[in-house]
Image (spheres, helix red, strand yellow):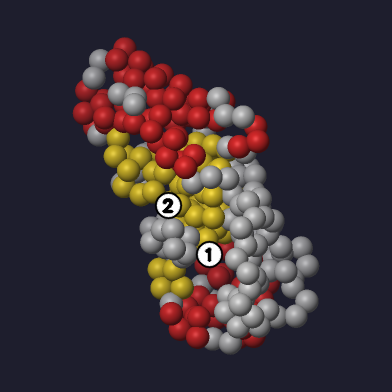
Amino acid sequence: MMVDLDPSGQVTQREPDRAQRQFLNYAFYKLDPAFRRLPQAERDELKAEFLAAAEAWVQEAPAEKGLIQRTYSLVGVRGDVDLMLWRIAFDLREFQEAQARLNRTRLMGYLTQPHNFVAMQKRSQYVNRIAGSGHGLEILPGQGRYLFIYPFIKTRPWYDLTPHARQGMMDEHIFASGPFKGVRINTSYSYGIDDQEFVVSFDSDYPQEFVDLVHRLRYTEASNYTLRDTPMFTCLKKDLQDVLNDLG
């Protein structure tokens, strides 16, 4: 396939795309240590109430809403957050409903949200020329035991490059990633709906493979145009009951 010479549609005045897409929400929570000073029976009661509210968001929704939720613990691997809920929906308002359900639980009185990212899934303009590297428009997340997440912003000079220059750098980037078959990337777009430009997450069973992948990508030319790719989160996939038990 040819390089897309008008990726933004500015020159051709491409019509807006209003097709249904998946929205993604990475919601991180931090526990107040005061929760651990409560009697064990009360802690168990608050966790059970929170668990029921979180699971009801998916269980009570009709299947056509396409709601997906994956749950992760960050206890012991990150100091500023303890758990993360990865939500996917076709309507941004579903994320508000999910959080509203949690806000009505007593456990939320002991939780804050240091980080909360919103993004949208769409097809990458760079991968279609590389056999086997295309990203679908819909994702089924949470296949690995680990999820590595970070918000991502390109430098402004990246957008001044010619389409051929950007495509060449991304071809190198994709080629460098090729051997790392145990890492699955989910790239989502936040232009205009959150502070970052992208949220990138990687499903894997092998943290060592992900470390080596990120190390290798530091040597690609495209990495010179990264403005910010922190904070980085290492999330351990668990059932929500186990995630809550990690809290105390």
Q: Which mark is residue 214?
A: 1
Compared with 200, 127 (above or below) is: below
Residue 183 falls in which quadrant of the image? bottom right
Direction top: furthest residue: 41
Q: Which residue is mark 2?
A: 117
Residue 11 falls in which quadrant of the image? bottom right
Q: Which x, y percent locates residue 148? A: 50, 52
Q: Camera-side residue: 155 or 184?
A: 155
Query: Which residue is painted at 40% across and 36% down in the image?
Result: 99
Task: Identify residue type, mark 1.
Answer: Val
Residue 9 falls in which quadrant of the image? bottom right
On the rendered image, what quadrant is the C terminus found in? top left
Compared with 243, 231 (above or below) is: below
Q: Which x, y percent locates residue 186? A: 59, 55
Q: Is residue 58 visible?
A: yes
Q: Say which label, 2 or 1, has the lower sequence index.
A: 2
On the rendered image, what quadrant is the N terminus found in? bottom right
Q: Which x, y percent locates residue 163? A: 61, 83
Task: Identify residue type, mark 2.
Answer: Phe
Element under label 1? helix
Query: Which residue is painted at 27% across and 31% down in the image?
Result: 110
Gap between marks 2 and 1 measured at Cα: 21 Å
Callout 2–callout 1 Cβ contact below 8 Å: no
Q: Camera-side residue: 2 or 222?
A: 2
